[in-house]
Image (cartoon, rainbow, N blue to C red):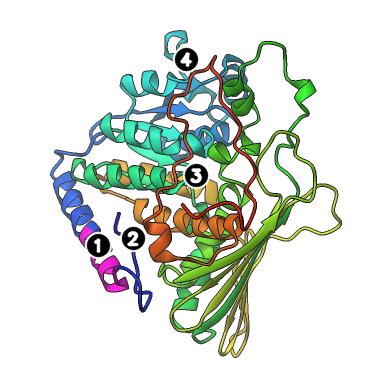
Amino acid sequence: MSINHDSGDNGPSRREFLKGATTAGVATAASAALMATGNYAFAQGSDTIKVGLIGCGGRGTGAAADAMQADPGAKLVAMGDVYKRQLDNSLRTLLQQEDIKAKIDVAPEKQFVGLDAYKHVLDTDVDVVLLTTPPGFRPLHVKAAVAANKHIFAEKPLGTDVAGVRSALEAVRAGQSKGKCFVSGFCYRYATTHKQFYKRLHEGAIGPVRAIHATYVTGPVKPMPPASARPAGMSDTEWQIRNWYNFVWLCGDGLIEQACHSIDKILWAMKDVPPVRAVGTGGRMFPNNEGNIYDHIDVFYEWPDGTRATMAQRQMPNLPHNDNTDYVIGTKGVGTVHFAAAEMTGDTMWRTDPPPKSMYHLEHDALFAAIRAGKQINDVERMARSTIAGLMGRMAAYTGAQITWDQIMKSKEDLFPASLDWNGALPIAEMAIPGKTPVV
């Protein structure tokens, strides 16, 4: 995996990384040219783009609704989840939306349940697959979707460990010649307000960037219930998947599952050049029963020219202040990036107009428009880069070590269970302890 940079004294150079990215871009352009001939335009000439949903939770249900609104010919025809109840709830929710209910046509024989549900969805004749399960499964599902020759929308992040991200990245790269689209759930990249901001930033509106402070300071997503709440006879595997947000192999910790958006924006501000090194702190203030994620992590990133970025992330209950903002400090001013707006102060005084459309809609609009036009979108390079930058920060916080980009790129960290049985035993890894947890 060649997402590298020039650290000055370690590993492959940034020049090699950019060369790799350029090579990928050439491959994408070549694929687009082939698609323009009609040879790879899966949905061109057809009125219907068939969609399959893998992962029917809240995010998956929202993604399916967005996909249905993105194209007049989109139709949801297959769904898969580990829980029938979750699939049923998702289907019912979608059918209750007046503007899309006519586009929901999921026959009983195309409703799949179980750990292998993703395989059955991919075995149908869907053109597009939405991958929205807990991110621990993302690499497995991405690889299978590429092999099945589908257009892919993959929710962020790309994985929860370096081995998984590497395998997904390599699979998408290898499949580029098929001309399929791969759109990432790093949705800010599609927001009109944020695109305006970062374009002006890169044009020098507030001067060269010297520091970034990003925050994702919020409450817990899904608190871990006590062991006493576990139903009798429920397997370790099911218990962990049911409470997926509390286990590192499934969610990646809050820094990876939630704050990865902020890390992606940090890299966007830095023109997608990765940091050379990171140190981090973190831990657990509130009890988490059997879970093994931290409830706060702060990461300090550094670039070769001395530019620094801090990433402050926490998920603690009932605290009086939350914040999800990025502060970009340049030599001529300051940029402030909010959820749906951005502004600049200093030599330049500027603020974005209200967004005309949700970024969640826009990412699907872009995907379906590209499919219709016979063009190729491929977000996998930057999705992998931003995910790995997050994993770099998590490793720094978990181990207490300084982690370089070269180290994280060579990491052998692999958290996904070697054998996953729905009814089987699955020991819970201990929570990381800085100074004791090793760099892998």
Precedes in sequence: disc 4 or disc 3: 4
Task: Report the magenta residues as a range.
Answer: 12-23
Residue furthest to the front in view is 436
Give the Cα separation between the discs numbered 4 and 1.
Answer: 40 Å
Amino acid tagged 3: Thr
Q: Can residue 297 be seen?
A: no
Q: Quadrant of the N terminus?
A: bottom left
Q: Main secondary structure of the magenta part?
A: helix
Q: Nearer the viewer, residue 100 or 115?
A: 115
Regarding residue 64, the answer to whether it shows in the image is yes
Q: Which mark is residue 111?
A: 4
Does dot 2 land on a helix, a strand or a loop? loop
Which numbered dot is residue 3? 2
- Give SS at disc 4: strand
Q: Residues within 10 Å of mark 2 (few under 14, many from 20)?
A: many
- Name the amino acid, label 2: Ile
Going from N to C along the chain, the mark reached first, 4 or 1, is 1
**Mark sitting earlier along the chain (1/2):** 2
Front residue of 368 and 9? 9
293 up-or-down from 89: above or below:
below
The amino acid at mark 1 is Gly
Q: On the image, numbered disc 3 is attached to which residue?
A: 160
What is the spatial separation of the Cα atoms under label 3 and label 2, in whole angstroms?
17 Å
| Distance Cα–Cα, label 2 vs label 4 | 38 Å
Q: CA distance from mark 4 to mark 3?
A: 27 Å
> Residue sitting at 61 percent across and 28 percent down?
240
CB of mark 4 within 8 Å of CB of mark 1?
no
**Above or below: residue 136 compared with residue 103:** below
Q: For marks 3 and 1, give the CA distance.
A: 23 Å
Q: Is residue 146 left or right of residue 224?
A: left
Q: Is residue 311 above or below residue 293?
A: below
Of the image marks 3 and 1, the number of the one nearer the N terminus: 1
